[in-house]
Every structure is written in structure tokens, then in C-alpha cells.
Amino acid sequence: MIRQVIAALICLAVVLAAPFAVSDFWVFIFIEMLVFGLYAVSFNLLLGYGGMLAFGYAVFFGIGAYACAILIKRFGFDALSATLLAPLVTAVAGAIIGYFCVGLTGTYLGMLTFAFQMLVYTVVLKSYDFTGGDDGLSGLKISGFAAAPRGFYYVTLAVVALSLVVLWRLVHSPFGLALRAQRGNAPRSLALGINVSLHRWATFVIAAFFAGLAGALFALANHSVFPGWLNWTASATPIMMTILGGMHSFIGPVVGSIIYVLMQSWLTGQTEYWALFLGIAIILLVMLLPNGVMGLWRNSQT
Amino acid sequence: MAFLSAFELLNDPVVVIRQLMAGLANGMLLFLVAAGLSLIFGVSRIINFAHGAVFMLGAYIALTIVNAAGQSTGAFFLAVLISTGFTFLFGMAFEVLCLRRIYRSPQTFQLLVTFGLVLILGDAVKLVWGPEENSVGVPPDLEGIVRPFGVSFPVYRLMLIGVGIAMCAALWILLYRSRWGMLVRAATADRQMLQALGIDVRRLFTVVFGLGTGLAGFAGGLATPVMSIGPALHAQVLIDAFVVVVIGGMGSIPGALVGALLVGQANAFGTLIYPSLSIIFPFLVMTVLLIVRPRGLLGKPE
């Protein structure tokens, strides 16, 4: 117990002190790890806990990011209230998309999220006056403490940590247990009196909320949004992070996010053809580490 | 006003017939790509995200051979033949090296492996052929325009329609009139049963995957004179093929034909009547269809 407390305190000290030991570039990398960590954990709520593979999941990240940017640029909101409202907008989108998805299973569910994603993507591309079309929106201003990269790091750290605590409590609540039960055996869960569709629907809404929050934070970290965040290839990112870290562990997707962001930023610095090596790395990792890094770690413990 | 005048164009039978034929030629290419995607999905339940990338690979190989061998009709058809053969072997090699090991894994793994291939091929073509857009001339013997019913129409597109019809017939004979095709259809229905009956299912899966990618490579080679060949080609092709397969019914080859003909016509008339809506329209159809009839027009219920 004492050892765990000490380990936790060391971790806390490291994440708090980290931004002062490194350059602005690395502060941005840390922010990216946190934001994508939250994004991937929210994705794993659907995949790992709910058993739903949404391969159009970037639609929620993108809606969160665009909602934040549009509220600031088109409606004159400040960054703080836009960040608070964007996840709510995304949760509404999650309620609409989820409503239609929860009735489907397997590939059809995934395909429908893909279809919604492409629908939103093309609408964003074509609504030039509102969304900036191909160019996206830039010049999102943040004022006060969070305007500096290190300030924004602490805000992101606090928001992500709080969100992870909420999500941790959620997956260990009766709701989380029921969600896992329906993943294992939906007909039996139904017979036990669990409202399977309602649980799946609520999971879509909650996951969308946190993905939207991550999207809004990422928009502010970049001071801009780009339509590429909504394109189909963007949906591979949370999937890769989740599988890399391990979908059978709550914190796995965060570990996956840290490794993925490190790997990508290192590769982009080494070669123009980083995607080539990333592709090779993904294929090798999936084939060699089927339970992710956390699975490897757990095996070494026993 | 632009809207009105576009509709007035439809009063002109020459325009209507021209668009019909253009849509038919485009639809035949789409059919070849989508049939491969649907064949692979039907048998192995794998959604090959790299299908567009294989199409692109086929197009680049054809481009290289035509550039090396000169602009002759013979060289062009040799190029298409080599593209087909190469992508057939490439698909089989990929299946043996990667996919074969993960059929029992969650769908997420298969998705990531094919996505890894998208990243690899996307960068590999940039590395080998450069980032610029390329074009291939129409083979000399197929240049020019014919005037059936007083409507001028390029000979090459007529040939595409002819090749498409011939391939439909060939695929139909292969799948519905040969012993091998019977095995493929049996594998689509129940792989375990087929294996229990003593059929070498592993080899069947390999050849089916190769046949699917070979069809994509064949379409890629044939498309070179009518498409601009660049590193972004794969995304549009994949998405179009997805739309076709969902409309027709995932796993259904006749469905792929119906879906391809519909999407081909929708593209041809959509760009004429209301261009900015025409890119949104296919996804709207895909979304609505997945909600009201997930198995598509001709797919079997799950």
C-alpha cells in the first residue's frame, strides 16, 4: 500500500513538473498524449466495454472540435464556454447517431458510424461559409492562464484527469457491469432484465461527450480545426491507440496514446515517409502483441 | 437559377443519353472494385480497407508499363494484364503473411492490419512514383468517338462497358457454374461446415482474397485513361466501393452490380444537376439504407 502511494506521488510529481523540463515542442506533445488518451479511453468505452466497433468514431472528435471552433469564430464565445458547450453538442450528435446504431450489430454498426462520419465530413467540406471548407478554421484565441503552452498543459491535465476519474467510476458502477454483461451475452442480459439497447445508447452518448471534449481541447491546442480530422482515415487513430495499449484494461488506451504519439512524432522527425513505417509498425504490433502493451505487462506480472 | 437550367438540360435527349452512358462506364469500373470487396467480405468477413490502395497500385503499375513500352494498344492491354496479375499475387501474399494468422482475432485486428496496408501503399507509391498526378493516354486504337443514335460517345468508355459486361458474365460463371464457385458460396454461408467436409478452406481464403485484389488491380489498370493517377486516388475509390457494397448488400456480388450501376448513374446525373450536393448524396443514401435495410438491396438477412 505504502509503495503504491509513493509510486502514485512520484507519477503526480512527474506529470506536474514535466513541462518545465522540456521545450514548448514537447509540451505540445504531452498535451497531445493527454487529449488522445481521453479520446481513446472514450472509444474503448464502446469497443472494450460495450463490444461495439465504431469505425467512424472520429465523427465525435471532429464534431467536438468544430463545435468549439464555430462557437468561438461564428458566435463570439470565449474559449472556456466553447470548451464546456462543445461536448454537449457532441453528446447530442452521439444521441442521434447512437439511436440508429444500437439496433445494429457487428459490421453493420461499424458501417453506419462510417456513413455518418462521411456524411458529416462532406457537409463540413461543402459548408464553406460556416466551417471554412477545405481550409478549416484557424486563429482560435485563448485568454488568461491557458494562453501559454504550459498553462494549457495544466488545464488539459486537470480536465483529462477528472474525465478519467468519472469514466473509471462509470465502468466500475452497476451501469458498467451491465454494459460488459451485454457485450458477453446480449440475450441473457436481456433475460436478466438489463435494458440492452438503453445501455448501449447511453454509452454512445457518454463516449461522444468525452470524444467531443477531447476534440475541443485539441482544437484549442492547435488554435485551429481541419476537415482532415473528420475524414475516414482519422478514425483509425483511436482504434490503433486502443489496440496498442490493450482494450482489456481501463488505462490501456492512454498507454497506447502515449506510445502512438511518441512513435509518430519520432517518425515524422526521421523521414518524410513516416506513414510507411507507421503502417509496418501497426501490422507487426497487431500480429505480435494481440493483447497490447498492457496485456504484455500483465503477463509479466503473473 | 443554375438549378433550373440544369434540369432543363435533362429535356435534351442527347445529354441524357450521354450521361447514361458515362454513368454506365463509370458504374462498370465501380462494379469491378466493389465485387472484389464484397467477395472478400462475404467469404472471410474482412472489410478490406486497403481495397482502394490496391486499385491505386494497379493503376500505377499500368502507368509504368505504358510509359516504358510506349503508347500502343498492345502495350496498354499488356499493362492491364500485368497489373491484374501483380495485384492477384500481392493479395495472396498479404493474406498468407498477415490475415491468415488473425481470422480468429476480433474484427478490430483485421481492420487495423488492412489499414496498416493503406498507410504502407499510400507512402510506397509516393516513394516510387512521386507525389504528382499522372495520366495515361487512351490506347490509339480506342481513341475517337462513335455516334450511336446521333450521340457522340468516346470509344474507350464503350469498351469499358463491354469489358464490364464480360466480367459480370465471367464472374457469374465462376461463382455459380463452377465447382470452385460453389465452394466459395458455401464458405460464405458456413465456413466451419465446409472445413468439416474436408475442403482446404485456408487455400480457398487465400485465392478468394487474391481474386478480390486482382479485380481491384484490373479495374485500376483499366481506369488509367479515364482517371487522374495520384497518391490520393485510393481514398475516393475505397469510399465509392463502400457505398456500392452497402447499397447492394455486403457479400452479395449481384448486389455489387446493382449498387455500382445505381451509384454510377447517381454520380453522372448528380454532378450535372446539383454538383455540390452530389458528393453528400451517396452518404445520405448509405446512411438511410443502413438504418432502414442494413442488408442492402440484395443481401441476405443475418
Image (tube, coloured by chain):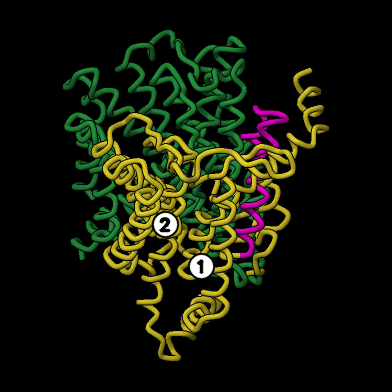
Chain colours: A green, B yellow
- How far across and down, in percent of the image, does residue A294 sit? 27, 54
**Horizontal arrangement in the rendering, residue A301 relative to residue B131 (left or right):** left
Q: Which residue is drawn at 55% across and 51% down?
A: B159
Dot 2, how many residues are within 10 Å of its Cα: few (below 14), some (14-19), or many (20+)?
Answer: some
Q: Residue at x 26, y 64 (%)?
A: B97
Q: Which chain carries label 2?
A: B
Q: Quadrant location of the C terminus of chain A?
A: bottom left
Q: Is residue B204 visible?
A: yes
Q: Which chain carries label 1?
A: A
- How far across and down, in percent of the image, does residue B206 sit? 36, 70
**Horizontal arrangement in the rendering, residue B24 relative to residue B228 (left or right):** right
Same chain assignment for discs 2 and 1? no
Q: What is the secondary structure assignment of the residue under circle 2?
A: helix
- How far across and down, in percent of the image, does residue B199 sit? 41, 86
Q: Which residue is drawn at 69% across and 31% down?
A: B272
Dot 1, how many residues are within 10 Å of its Cα: few (below 14), some (14-19), or many (20+)?
Answer: some
Count numbered badges in the picture.
Answer: 2
Read off the residue under disc 1.
A184
Give the magenta part as a residue range: B254-281
Instruction: Tell me, for residue A50, which label it has, or none.
Output: none
User: Would you say the magenta stretch is mainly helix, strand or loop?
Assistant: helix
Q: Is residue A114 magenta?
A: no
The answer to which image quadrant residue B297 occupies is: bottom right
Which circle, 2 or 1, is nearer the viewer? 2
Read off the residue under disc 2.
B108
Q: Which residue is drawn at 62% across and 12% down?
A: A75
Q: What is the secondary structure assignment of the residue under circle 1?
A: helix
